[in-house]
Amino acid sequence: AGAETARGDLEQEPLPNAIEASVETQAQPAARSSEFRLDSLVIDGLDLLVLDESVTPPVRVPLNQLDVGVKGFTTRMLEEERALRFWVNLGAGDIPLPVRTKRSFLGGLASSALKVTGMDKDKSEAVQRALFDEVGITGRVSLYPAPAGWAKVELSALELQAFRGLANAAGVTIGDGLLDSRIDVRLLGDSGVKTNAEFSFQYLSLDEPANGPISRYLKLPAPLDAVLFVLRNDDGEHVIPLKFEMSAEGGVTARHIAQVATTTLAKVIADAIASSPFRVLGSVTDMVGLTKQKSDDFAEDAVSVSFPRADTSLALDIHEQLEDLLELLDDEDELTVVLQHELGSLDLARAEILANPAPEDCSELAQRLRSKRDQLCVTRSSIVAESRAHYAVGREEEALESTERLRAIDAELGLTENSLDELYELMRPGAERRRDKRTRAACLEIAARRLDAMRQFLIDSGLAAERIDSRRPRFEVLEREQGAILLAPKKRP
């Protein structure tokens, strides 16, 4: 009875006003803010010419391809954890550019040497080349509670000569240059930003007066010509990696990113100079004629191995083709062999077909892959049940065998899903504009597989891996029908 009286007193006792207000507040859900949502936005097509005639030569930037996509945008991203996906693909038209010569491959050092001797004369001949192949931007980001996600930027085949006018006005001479770059940015929320980038220059040729704008801005520890010589790799390219992280404290601004990137680049250059002091000295003495380049006594022993169109397998008589070269490498221990791939016109034609199937072929192949995926899923379910049964009754050997089969099925499922993703990319609106990019990627894949096959053959023939210098393939179609690999013996440095 006492308990009942106490309970009755509690039920009859009025709640204080503050507690009543709190109970009502908790009972009612918070009102959500109004929302503007954009589930999907696609922008397709562009015809824009940016022309600057205030410099000589004028700068022309013809933009003729655009594909922009945004999915999952909502104003509630500012107060809820929601992700936004986006992509941008930009293409450019042709512009008149000077004919590219092999002299450009030597970089800024050779350019300066030719000027000293008076042999560097401008050529009026010009050809039409695309300003760049493509700019591609993709990403996935969320803003709440802190910016998180990723973004990737890829630039392919930007012609630096297109900006000679702007460079001349700044006191820099661009002889040549082709830029490929990739930038990977990771937004880590409250931890800041992590950036991993790589800039690759081909045919780079720059010149500036002593203490010019580039040297001043980057605080170069040596003349620009010497720095370019040191940074140039065996393929004649300048590959500059940049990796840095930034704290979220104080905010991440474009100016802050530029400062950190510049500081990182200056350190990369300083480290390269510090690790190659004799190479810097050699570049200067070579230019003024104090030293002489060693002649290659084994140039006549170089061998060219041809391939049928887009074929990546070695010929059955490959050992006979390379018999003399292999004997030379076996007799001369100080020799290495340089592998350089040359793309043929037949390779290009076949790669274009393989990389760009017709829409109806894509649809048919996608249907086959979906059927294959469904069948793999059914098989996987069966193996999972079988594996569980084996483990339940203690059949360890059969259980392990089932587990290995399951791993193989999972690997095949992953490859099938990747193939479907690639097919869907080919079927997406605007995919035709990336035809040239896919063709170029296919050609480079053909070249890479040929080089790998040749390298493996040489290793199987008894040549040590460290004596094989396989140069990175380039997208350059020479005046030949069949592609080939040039094997050139060379003395070790």
Image (cartoon, helix red, strand yellow):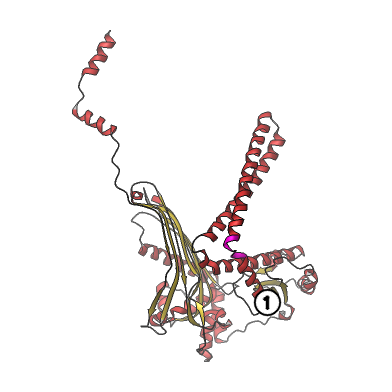
Viewport quadrant of the C terminus = bottom right
- 102 or 297, which is in the foreground? 102
Q: Is residue 457 above or below residue 124?
A: above
The quadrant holding residue 288 is bottom right
* Count of numbered tags: 1
Which residue is disc 1 drawn over?
481
Q: Residues within 10 Å of mark 1 (few under 14, many from 20)?
A: some
- 341 or 375, which is in the foreground? 375
Horizontal side of residue 365 vs 90, given as left or right: right
The quadrant holding residue 349 is bottom right
Give the amino acid type for the residue marked by disc 1 in the picture. Glu
Q: Is residue 344 in view? A: no
Could you tell me which residue is drawn at 28 percent across and 33 percent down? 26
Magenta stretch: residue 477 in it? no
Could you tell me which residue is drawn at 19 percent across and 28 percent down? 17
- 19 or 205, which is in the foreground? 19
Q: Position of residue 336 (x, y in %)?
A: 70, 71
- 84 or 337, which is in the foreground? 84
What range of the chain is rendered magenta?
354-360
Q: Dot 1 lies on which element? A: loop
Horizontal side of residue 405 vs 16, given as left or right: right
Q: Position of residue 258 (x, y in %)?
A: 39, 65
